[in-house]
Amino acid sequence: MRTIIAFMFLSTLCSAEHFVLGDYSSEGEREIVRRDMIAQAFELAGHTIEFAHRPAERSLREANLGLLDGDVMRQPDAVTSFNNLLMIDTPLTFYQYWVYMAADTPCPTEQLDIWEFKPVGLVGFRYFDAIYAQSRSGYQQVSNVSSVMDMLASQRADYSVMSAEAYDILSVRYNLNLTRCFDSPLLSYPVYTYLHSKHAHHIPSLTKAYEQVFGESDLGEP
């Protein structure tokens, strides 16, 4: 019996790994809680992790190349062209993306009318692609959040789309008040953890750990 226990203990030690996961997300309360829960799930599966903050597109590229072990807080459409990334199929939360317009720009009455206005979006945030495709007034695309806020402040774009948590942080950081339009979000997506395919053998045990940690949580589902 002692031999079996010792073997199981050594097997656990041998299979334990330290993961470095890319993370482009904000410092909102929900994101902080989710990072703690991700760490709990990895610990439950016998691993340790750290988060490496990266710009959104760079984080995915490095994870796909194996320079990072994976990436977190990603909606599936953002990952379709990154063939080396495998999903842990338990959602971390649901992101709701609301329309925010410059304070001097009246919100349209109907949500469908938003396509008559010009959006500004961020490079590397794939959910903007669906917005660009439907816009009948063109669009602006910039590489950082400060440029998004500047475009809205100067009215070179009419609106952007972000989570309520992100807006709460950015409005204070950039001292800019925007108007949230409509009673429902424009887009809503579940987000997941993805690992590089070199870690495929860990997916089953991590899936079980994720189900334990996230299965009973309030995911913020719409």
Image: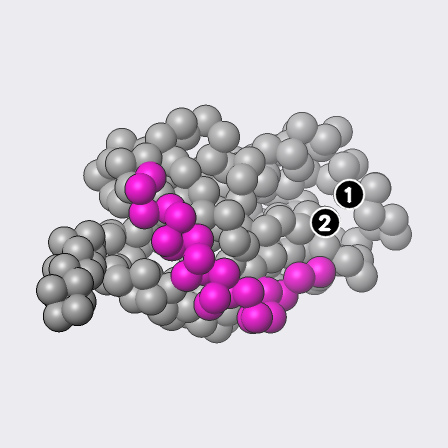
Q: Which mark is residue 50?
A: none
Label 1 crowd bin: few (<14), some (14–19), many (20+), radius 10 Å: many
Q: Quadrant of the N terminus?
A: bottom left
Q: Is residue 138 visible?
A: yes
Would you say the residues marked 2 and 1 are in contact, meaning their CB atoms lie under 8 Å apart? yes
**Comes first in the chain, label 2 or label 1:** 1
Q: Is residue 39 visible?
A: no
Q: Which residue does the numbered mark 2 point to in the structure image?
A: 186
In this picture, residue 96 sits left or right of residue 65: right
Q: Quadrant of the C terminus?
A: bottom right
The residue tagged with tag 1: helix, strand or loop? helix
What residue is at 50 percent from the left and 41 percent from the top? 125
| Number of numbered discs on residues | 2
Image coords of residue 217 (percent x, y): 56, 70
Cα–Cα gap, marks 2 and 1: 10 Å
What residue is at 56 percent from the left and 60 percent from the top? 93
Q: Nearer the viewer, mark 2 or mark 1?
A: 2
Image coords of residue 109 (percent x, y): 88, 52
In this picture, residue 108 sits left or right of residue 66: right
In this picture, residue 43 sits left or right of residue 188: left
Q: Is residue 138 above or below residue 199?
A: above
Image coords of residue 163 (percent x, y): 59, 58
Q: Predominant secondary structure in magenta? A: helix
Does the magenta segment cover residue 168? no
Image coords of residue 38 (percent x, y): 39, 63
Please provide the residue range marked out in magenta: 200-222
Q: Amino acid at mark 1?
A: Ile
In this picture, residue 212 sits left or right of residue 52: right
Label 2 crowd bin: few (<14), some (14–19), many (20+), radius 10 Å: some
- Return the residue nearer the eye: 118 or 61: 61
The residue tagged with tag 2: helix, strand or loop? loop
